[in-house]
Amino acid sequence: GVLKADEVPSKGGVVVAGATERQIASVVFVPGKIGFQFKGRLVTRVETGTQAAKNGVEPGWRLAAINSVPSPSGTAEIIKQIKSLFAAKQSITVEFFLPKPKTTQTEPNIPTPSSNPPEPADKLNKFDKSNKLDTFSESKQTLPTPPPPPPPPNLGNA
């Protein structure tokens, strides 16, 4: 998910500017494998366990700027821009346009359904358990009781 500005961890991470039209996420990458693939400015794939994944980058984000310089539109130009900055051993700040706020509408709703269903489920389980207990006790009454097992030989007196 995307962190809101007041939920940003102190170590950095994704900072979401409060833009009304399009949100922008700002992510800092250190020289090395950044861990996302893109076609033009569009992020197409994020590899798990990489800088991009740990910073919450998601497919569908669009590159907006690198170190405050508007991002080129061609894939090769963007790679060249990132590589030249990494060659100078500089960390880079990549700004991404986030997709139109679909996630912001669904995220607040996610806790609500998950917090409600357990109640009916618990009630159903209680009914299930009592029904099962009833059927077991009824079936036990109708079954003939098996004879008790013979006592084990008493080895203590032998």
Image: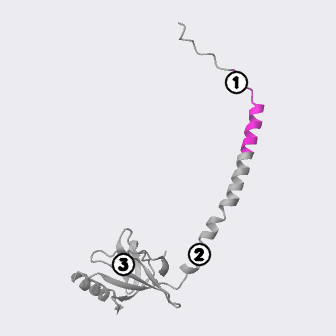
Asked if residue 90 is positioned above or below residue 136 in the image, the reply reads: below
- Rounded to the nearest whole Å, what is the CA distance between mark 2 and mark 3? 29 Å
Front tag of 2 and 1? 2
- Which residue is at the front of the view, 127 or 77? 127
Residue at which label 3 appears: 37
Asked if residue 118 is positioned above or below residue 50 in the image, the reply reads: above
Tell me if mark 1 has few (under 14), some (14-19) or many (20+) residues whose alpha carbon lies within 10 angstroms of its own.
few
Under tag 2, what secondary structure?
A: helix
Q: What's under tag 2, amino acid-wise? A: Pro
Nearest to N terminus: mark 2 or mark 3: 3
Residue at the spot 59% in from the left edge and 71% down from the top edge: 110
Residue at which label 1 appears: 146
Tell me if mark 3 has few (under 14), some (14-19) or many (20+) residues whose alpha carbon lies within 10 angstroms of its own.
some
Tell me if mark 2 has few (under 14), some (14-19) or many (20+) residues whose alpha carbon lies within 10 angstroms of its own.
few
Q: Is residue 158 left or right of residue 74?
A: right
Residue at which label 2 appears: 108
Q: Is residue 51 left or right of residue 101?
A: left
Q: What's under tag 3, amino acid-wise? A: Gln
- Rounded to the nearest whole Å, what is the CA distance between mark 2 and mark 1? 59 Å
Q: In the rendered image, which quarter is residue 87 located in?
A: bottom left
Confirm whether residue 4 shows in the render.
no
Under tag 3, what secondary structure?
A: strand
Specify the segment rendered in magenta: 131-147
